[in-house]
Image (cartoon, helix red, strand yellow):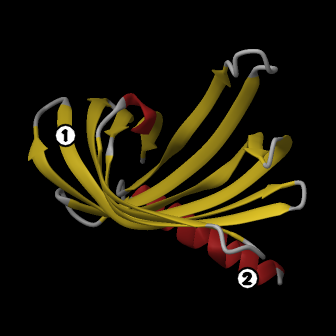
Amino acid sequence: MKKFYMTLVAMFVAVAASAQVYVGGNVGIASTDNGDDDDVTTYKFLPEIGYNINQDWAIGASFGWAKGSLDFDDDTYSAHTFEINPYVRYTFLHNKIVDVFCDGGFGYKHTSAGHIKANTWNVGFKPGVALKLDKFSLVAHVGFVGWKQTKIEDTDIKTTTWGVNFDNTDLSLGLFYNF
């Protein structure tokens, strides 16, 4: 087993040394005012790893968890979420310090809040921009174009959404290190 782990570490170092790997992610915190009710604070931690195939194409995945609350049937539950989002990235505009790209992929999110469990699937595109700062990059995604479905387990409750959304609720910022 020790040899297996050493082989994985050696493979990671070899790939990272080729200057094609990037790591980073998004961290978020939000506070929602519910009027007369208590405010709700949500935390999110989504690390990400990717591999640049060439100058235009990359593959990667973000994964992580969030903690917040869920209002359901006039009750509020502490909610815990795990999600994974693999993607393919195409960069269609290159500049010395700015890249403009679009991520195409799918995502899965499992939320657990008390006795309520929900699964969310999505397939679509997320446009973005990267500001290149030597070995670091600041990356912003704005919006979502695609399909999303949430189903609450053990119920008939299901919501399905198709569309384009370019408002501030689909804005994410991340910091990445490029090997």
Q: Position of residue 80 (x, y in %)?
A: 78, 50
Neighbor class of circle 1 (other Cα within 10 Å; few <14, some 14-19, many 20+) is some
Q: Label 1: which residue?
A: 99
Q: Position of residue 127 (x, y in %)?
A: 26, 47
Extreme-front residue of the structure:
74
Q: In terms of depth relative to the viewer, which is nearer, 16 or 139?
A: 139
Extreme-top residue of the structure:
36
- Mark 2 and mark 1 residues within 8 Å of each other at the beta carbon: no
Label 2 vs label 1, nearer the camera: 1
| Residue type for callout 1 | Asp
Q: Position of residue 71 (x, y in %)?
A: 75, 42
Instruction: Please determine whether, in this image, residue 78 is positioned above or below residue 83.
Output: above
Q: In terms of depth relative to the viewer, which is nearer, 122 or 179?
A: 122
Q: Determine whether, in the image, residue 113 is placed left or right of residue 32.
A: right
Neighbor class of circle 2 (other Cα within 10 Å; few <14, some 14-19, many 20+) is few
Q: Quadrant of the N terminus?
A: bottom right
Q: Label 2: which residue?
A: 4
Instruction: Please determine whether, in this image, residue 174 is positioned above or below residue 112.
Output: above
| Residue type for callout 2 | Phe
Q: Position of residue 159 (x, y in %)?
A: 53, 63
Which residue is at a point 60% across and 46% down the rendered structure image? 46
- Cα distance between the residues tagged 2 and 1: 38 Å
